[in-house]
Image (tube, rainbow, N blue to C red):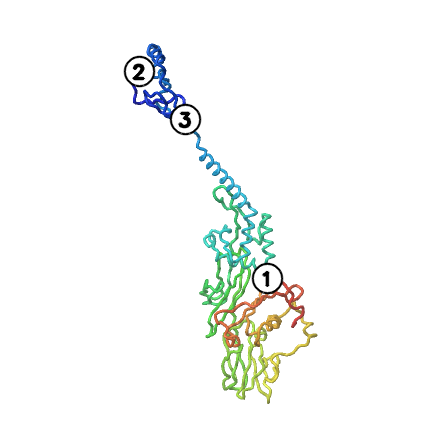
Amino acid sequence: MLGEKRMDEQLICSKCGAEVKEGEIFCRNCGQRLEATADNKQDGAEDLNDGPSSSENVDTQNNYQRSTSEQPPKTFNKKLGVLIGLIVVVLAGGYFGLNSYYQPQKQLDRAAAAIGNPSVGLAKYVTTDDPTLQNDISDQNLKPTQKYFKKDQQKLAALKTALKQGSVYKNSYSFKKDGNALLFFPRYKVNIKGAYVKLHINRSGVELFQDNKKVAETSKSNSIKEIGPIFPGNYTFKAMKVVSGRKLSNSTTTTIYGGSKNLVLNLKTVSFTLHGDPGSTIYLNNKKAGTLNAEGQMKFNDYPFEGKLKVYAIDSSKKKSKTVDIGNDLEDGIHHFYFSSDGDETSAASSNSGANASSDSSSDTTDTDANANSQVDTKNLTTEQVNDWILVHLKANYDFSVTEDDFIFEQQKNDEGLLEINVRENHASENMRAQNASPDHNPGVGSFVIDADGHLRNAITNEVVATEYGE
């Protein structure tokens, strides 16, 4: 029937598409007349059977359409379009910004800056092919590497140049791709080869330390203890044992590169006998060691020896002998030393060296004129001569009198075969204790090197300190 309204149909205005109700004359949305004229209605009634079927969408009597499923067309949301555009711009800008940030050269610049600065973290820039070392990548474990390059900016520049060229520096450092960042950008890191140190020790029961941290202990004589893997850098290794009630130690500070390195930390002791007036008090390295017995002898077995051993005696009349360093004689196999008094003179001599010392009224050191110093071959100095030369330059830094016993001199050959000397205060000395120096810390006070010309240089500033021995 013409007036029948199917429930699944909707009537919509043919002009604006708004929903209308059957029988309404005007569209409530746009005002369009919906019902035709009476003539049109009549004509439409007569032509009903000839008109379109009930399934068609156009109503022949009214200016509206029937719709069963289509919704009115919706206008485009301009705000949504703007938002989508902004998102696209932000994403594009972020991509290009990150693409620039992750350029290999920029990643290398950031890594190199961190390697030379111990105050910043380095772990995020580092990887390693050593599976054992992989789990030890941390900012703390990489500090020796950073300290090494901070000390020598030329080596840091050489490292950066080698990595930029795709080369391996010192058989230890390379620059390689290590996965992707944020899925799209290649990530590069400094690949560091692990280092292994073999410590050779001649005694059992020796405690071994790496940068003051105990890392091993020997269980037999002539042992080899492997330390590692560790990251390349500067390390101090120390061997220590109490022998005959005395602490015996040997330490060295050295640069470690990737691969394996051997270090000898033998603990050396000497046995010797001192002779002199019965009852004389003996001092070794400024420490009271005992009194000569009734036979005028005092024997020392397994006495800790680190290259120097200064001895003097004070007899019953309080006369003090000259201080004599018997270290060189001990190295030469001499084991008997004599201290005797003759009138006002107290002297000391080795059994077969014939070297005599003057009385206490004279100076402990012999003055050497400048001409004699200039004849000393500074390329072939003894350990003691090196220490004495450096001591001349250390004295100016103190407002109290210091001696060689107030310092610890650590000598070693560097990569160029030159002698490097690192100096620390010896807070165990009587002099330093008298100045209330902290017994738990021996701070570094200087680093020196004797160059190929025999000149003494400051190892940090590379400044020439002296060109002749004794200067």
Q: Earlier in the sequence, mark 1 or mark 2?
A: 2
Most extreme residue toward the bottom, as rendered?
Answer: 343
Instruction: Single out the mark in the foreground, 3 or 1.
Output: 3
Residue 360 sits in quarter: bottom right
Nearer to the camera, 27 or 134:
27
Residue in the picture at 60% in, 66% down: 448
Mark 1 residue crowding within 10 angstroms, few (<14) / some (14–19) / many (20+)? few
In this image, 163 relative to 66: left or right?
right
Q: Label 2, on which residue?
A: 2
Nearer to the camera, 406 or 360:
406
- Image coordinates of residue 390 in percent, x first then y, are 61, 70
Q: Earlier in the sequence, mark 3 or mark 1?
A: 3
Q: Label 3, on which residue?
A: 73
Question: Which secondary structure, mark 1?
Answer: loop
Query: What whole-number distance in Å separates the C-alpha atoms at marks 3 and 1?
Result: 85 Å
In this image, 345 relative to 440: left or right?
right
Q: Are marks 1 and 2 in contact (CB under 8 Å)?
A: no
Quarter occupied by the C terminus: bottom right
Residue 414 is labelled as 1
Q: Are marks 3 and 1 in contact (CB under 8 Å)?
A: no
